[in-house]
Image (tube, helix red, strand yellow):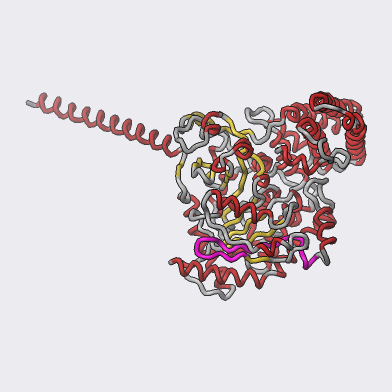
Amino acid sequence: METGNTFSGSGICLLLVISVVLAKAVDNTEGNTAASEKAIRLSQSLCAGEQEYVHKRKRVVLESLSSLGINCTTDSVPHIALLASGGGQRAAVGLVGSLYQMEKEHLLDTLLYLGSVSGSTWSMSSIYSDPQWSDSLDTAVSRLSGPGVPLEEALAWLGERAKEEHFSLSDVWGVLTSAGIMKQMDLRRLSDEASRNATNPYPIYSAIEKHCYSHGPIQGKWFEVSPHEAGFTELGLFISTSLLGSTFQNGELLEEKPEMDMVKLQGILGCALAHEETIKDLIPPWLNVPGQVDSAAEDYLRVYNALNTLVALTRSTIKDPTALSDLDKLQKILEDMLNHNKSVWLESESSEERKSLSGQWSLELLAAVQTWSQSLEDGAFKTHVSLLTKQVLPMIMKWEWGTTGNFLYQYQDSTVPPYLRSTERFHLTDAGLLINVGYPSFLGEKRDIDLIIAPEYSAGNMFETLTLARDYAAEVNKPFPEIDAKILEERDWPKGCYVLKGKEKEPTIVYMPLFNRHNCKDAAEFKAKMEEFSTFQRPYSQEKIEFVLETAKANIKTNKETLLREIKKAVLRRHNKI
């Protein structure tokens, strides 16, 4: 009996151990299944992380409204977003100026969200490197005029990226705009911000998928990136931001790769040069005649402008007078080659002949850079230039931008465009090519925005961002406020502020052009300012930086009462939704 009892007890123990092991195995299997199912989130609602952040941020907004004498309850905190347009360095500097003055006028903490596109992503990513930036923007302002990042530091970063599978021209663009324009190498990851407190507005960055932008459908075009998630706005398909660039297949995560840093992300988000349409803004006068700009001309100009821009950005990372003189010589060589080919090009009789000339001249441009590089005096600058040309020149001919691992590869859902299901990599690029303000991420029920503050730094036709957003909203069946046709007639000399009134579902938009009737005496001066501060030019001088900063600050100060009035209305609107 005693032995039997012992055996029985041991057997029970053994069975218990086995059952626990099996239970854990089942739990792990279920956990892995759940993890794979959750690797891609399909939803048109906020993820849990953003919901939590927004909930905390509303307490900050409530306190801010109270300090402004605006009565508000926890339930009626309005959803206010500031959406900065693109516009190269003009937008990057302008956004810093606008936010600086918003803080001085005690309006900054009324913002729930901050969104950016193209050039404004440069400064937005830089600003958020300081977890407490909302308390003071003095650091952000002073950095714009700082000494810049040494070329060798930028090249060290670029050398590491060149070893990666998804190395592209976006990396080159990102490191040179970071080092030369924003004067900072921000090596943190965007997902690092997911664990921050709600001191700052919640940031949303925007991009577009290049193939879907060119070929459709519209649902595959707009791509948004936040500290928590990255994905396609209209498809409602998202992954954790830390997994952007990792390897997926059939909805499952196969290989997790290191998350890209902010330098690389900045290059993806703000690289208008990546798309062929941008070339139209960079055509020399002699070529800008009917019948001359075909695909062959665009190919040639693409190479020329990429090299010219590369020289300009490199200039902003060095101080040595001899090196600067050498870069001036290279710029002159490139300009002379472009103009020297003028007569031959204009006399060409067929597209085949022009295509042949384009290929030949593109190679000659690259060869000229190589010859110039080899002719430099031995020293640090020559070493740096040699490294740069070795990594960049082959990429210019390849013309590949924003290469990223595609998390929708072989994803089993018929709503996903066939292209996105069939390619292992997609290409993310500058959203300003579609709409130069991030409206798509802020329309509809998902973020349920009451008021959009829209400082306009764009170089194109005034109000174009509004009309493009209106048309986009109509196509995806989302609400957008009505645009009075009369205001469109003022595009050549706009007022400093326009209010597009939202009704029940449409957000109200306060639209504020950078250059306007307050700071330009007539249409001629407005046009001159737009040309003087054009998007595609050398990095700004200190004088130009100061001018854009002060202009953006003045616009916020001038329109403070309008902003306060619309914020009050947004509180009432939110209250009526309860």
| Number of marks drawn | 0
Q: Is residue 91 left or right of residue 9?
A: right
The answer to whether residue 155 shows anywhere in this view is yes
Which one is nearer the viewer's eye here, 200 or 370?
A: 370
Q: Residue at x 52, y 69 (%)?
A: 571
Q: Residue at x 56, y 29 (%)?
A: 423
Magenta stretch prevailing secondary structure: loop
Q: Is residue 556 left or right of residue 477?
A: right
Q: Quadrant of residue 430?
A: top right
Q: Which residues are magenta?
A: 500-519
Give percent across and percent down for residue 157: 71, 35
Which one is nearer the viewer's eye here, 173 or 263?
A: 173
Q: Residue at x 70, y 64 (%)?
A: 101
Q: Is residue 67 above or below residue 47?
A: below
Give percent across and percent down for residue 92: 72, 52
Quadrant of the frame with the N terminus: top left
| Magenta highlight on residue 505 | yes
Q: Residue at x 61, y 53 (%)?
A: 469
The answer to whether residue 366 shows anywhere in this view is no
Quadrant of the frame with the C terminus: bottom left
Give percent across and percent down for residue 509: 61, 62
| Magenta highlight on residue 69 | no
Q: Quadrant of residue 487?
A: bottom right
Q: Residue furthest left?
A: 1
